[in-house]
Image: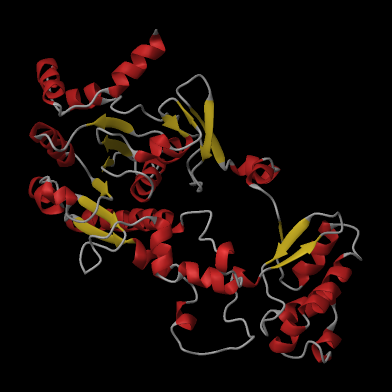
Amino acid sequence: MALPLEGVRVIDFSRVLAGPHCAKHLLDLGAEVIKIEPPRGDLSRLAFPRSGDISGYYAQQNAGKRNISIDLNVAEARDVALKLCATADIIVENFRPGVLESFGLGYASVAARNPSVVYVSISGYGQRGSWRARMAYGPAVQAEVGFTRNTLRQFSVDGADRRTDALTHGDVYAGLHGAIAALAALQHRRLTGQGRYIDVAMAAVLTSMNERVHYDLSGIDLGAEEPILGAAGSEFFTSPEGFEFVVPFSLLSSMTFPLYLAAMRRPDLADDPRFVTPGLRKENLEALHAVVQNWIWTFESMDALDAQFDEAKVATGRLRDINEFHNTDWAKDWVTTREVDDRHGGTMTIPAPPWHFSGHDGALTPQTPAHQGEHNEEILKELGYTDDQMRALVQSGALIEPAREILAETES
């Protein structure tokens, strides 16, 4: 059985993360993706670690995409791009608003030739409004929308110890929402024959993924009470075997404190004068944590402890790094990662698709990260260009061919 998007063509104008992440998920769902790369290359090619012109960062977001490199400042290159867009089911771009319109490649121009196209624009603050022209990277937008402030406030971090986050949530989630919207638009096109323009704003995406917006905007002061069930209130403990694990429930919250009492079979602690209210539990958190920790150490193993936690509907998660998780039996059985060619005699490990479809054998289609402009000739011939026309594109500066030199060096 084919993957769900087999036969769908995506033209990917994007670079770095949000757009490439969107297009990569469409690729993993079975679509064909052609990446259009600018003369200076995708910035992510410069990330570390890298092998030649292939960085791990670039490979993770782009392996499996065919690659054509053109300079949109040259009129002939814009003609090539328009011809490619005329063959597209989906277009993905994450330039600043107005950039592709200035090249005659905005939605209106493309839809005039391809009215059924689904066109996805991902930007920091959307295509309209007073912030539309602002440069946007994930950590900057995360700071703007309260995401970073919530993290600092929750963990009482201030001064020189302040940090944003190790991961770029804004870009990744914006890419996912772009893919979700594109799939919805494909369904609309199937029913009506009409294409759609999709405007995705990273700031709006981050707001939508913040599960405590209802509280943050309520003006309510809960004092020591925890406002939500989320990960911010997670507690760290040490297992009977000596490794650390996390319980995703707060000891302070009036909703989750009783779950610990049920797991420990200690309803009497609800009447302990040190623990009667969230405020008192906060004042005596060290003592309360010690009560739970000492109970944990009465078990012979984490398996035995988990069985009793499970009775009270309390989950646990071992504190691992990604290498430890990667080597678990579960990760291997599920196939959470895959190897791709690093184009230098070795391989790179990147995420595998996170879903399994019934009726599909789960086999992973080979994916190779392309050199910049590696498929120039192949793609242009599919568009009907002759050898003489391609040489003219190279001479005019419209067609960029670093891949030709890289492959020649490899072969020699």
Q: Is residue 337 left or right of residue 393?
A: right
Q: Quadrant of the C terminus?
A: top left
Colour pattern:
secondary structure
The answer to which of 119 and 398 lies nearer the viewer is 398
The answer to which of 141 and 340 lies nearer the viewer is 141
Question: Residue 390, how many percent across, how many down?
Answer: 14, 21
* Residue shown at 74% from the left, 59% from the top: 245
Q: Is residue 312 left or right of residue 19?
A: right
Residue 155 seen by the camera: yes
Question: Residue 150, how many percent across, how many down?
Answer: 51, 72
| Circle count | 0
The answer to which of 93 and 316 lies nearer the viewer is 93
* Residue shown at 58% from the left, 73% from the top: 154
* Residue shown at 76% from the left, 78% from the top: 285
Q: Quadrant of the N terminus?
A: top left
Q: Residue furthest front?
A: 160
* Residue shown at 28% from the left, 27% from the top: 373
Question: Residue 43, how many percent across, how many down?
Answer: 35, 39
Q: Is residue 74 left or right of residue 317?
A: left
Residue 238: quadrant of the picture: bottom right
Question: Residue 386, how many percent across, how many down?
Answer: 12, 18
Residue 2 seen by the camera: no
The answer to which of 350 and 218 lies nearer the viewer is 218
Give above or below for 154 relative to 240: below
Give above or below for 205 relative to 12: below
